[in-house]
Amino acid sequence: MGLAKTEMFTDEQNKISMFAKAFGHPARVAILQHLFKIDTCICGDLVSEIGLAQPTISQHLKELKNLGLIKGNVEGTSVCYCIDKDNWSSMKGIMAQFLDQDISSNSCC
Amino acid sequence: MGLAKTEMFTDEQNKISMFAKAFGHPARVAILQHLFKIDTCICGDLVSEIGLAQPTISQHLKELKNLGLIKGNVEGTSVCYCIDKDNWSSMKGIMAQFLDQDISSNSCC
DNA sequence: TTGTTTCATTGCAATATTACGATATAATGT
DNA sequence: ACATTATATCGTAATATTGCAATGAAACAA
């Protein structure tokens, strides 16, 4: 199958899993960390920084862009990618709500 | 390929992506939310709660267990699954460090 | 013992993901 | 115009993930 049955879950659950899936590859984690670290960033920078082929990086960037976590400005022949602050914040809120759940103390194990 | 080149990334990046991957499916998100909500839990409970076949739920539980996020106690013919508090906390710390990164204000876009 | 309940495992089909070579595109420099 | 640089897209091979029917295993009940 390989196909998640998203229709049987809440919007919140699907959102959480979509964001989490984006972070589910170390290259995308590395890309995001790098984008946080420096102020301007182009794809070529990421290729040499991360060590995957240019088409691979481009593909990862596309996924992050589709989710709205990053945005890219064309500047001449290169593209300036950076974190989309607003969307990152709202994503963080959704993820925090999931991660910060409190465990009921009368647990059985 | 379908194979992440984990050796070219830091331990932290690989850890983040491993946890994120676990949350990258709505069924696993739903399972964890359910385990948080109630104090005791057995697999059959989850099957009726979530609506996937029993082997599918069992498989998702196994992945969460392998990561250490949940643990299961055998109780007669049923199994009591619950959140592993300590491991959940340390996971939360690792994820928070990633999610709470601050954006340098002199961003280009 | 025989059946029942509960969960795990196996095996497999369908689909998704990852990676990259080859190629396309688009802006710029000469 | 032509070459160069930077990134995107296409095509495809290798591998991973998801889902479930069938079956197995373990505890319990009659």
Image: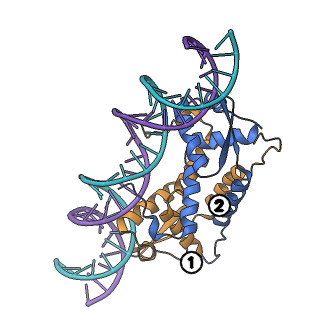
Chain colours: A orange, B blue, C purple, D cyan
The tally of labels here is 2
- Residue occupying the far right of the picture: A105
Quick one: quadrant of the N terminus of chain A? Answer: top left
Residue that badge 2 annotates: B95
* Residues flagged by tags 1 and 2 on a common chain: no
- B52 and A65: which one is in front? B52
Task: Give the percent coordinates (x, y) of residue C16.
Answer: 43, 46
Inspect this view and state whether residue A98 appears: yes
**Kind of residue indicated by mark 1:** Ile
Q: Residue B27 sits in which quadrant? A: top right
Residue that appears at 78% across and 46% down? A103
**Side (left or right) of B87 relative to B6:** right
Looking at the image, residue A28 sits to the left or right of residue C7; the answer is: left
Q: Amino acid at mark 2?
A: Met
Which residue has dot 1 on it?
A38
Disc 2 is placed on an element classified as helix
Q: CA distance from mark 1 to mark 2?
A: 20 Å
Name the image quarter holding residue A48: bottom left
Q: Residues within 10 Å of mark 1 (few under 14, many from 20)?
A: some
Query: Which picture quadrant has residue B2?
Result: bottom left
* Location of residue B87 with respect to A27 vertically, above or below: above
Q: Nearer the viewer, residue C30 or A50?
A: A50
Q: Tell me the residue at 59%/55% (across/down).
A: B19
Mark 2 Cα within 10 Å, few/some/many (few <14, many 20+)?
many
Percent coordinates x, y for residue D8 in the rendering: 37, 62
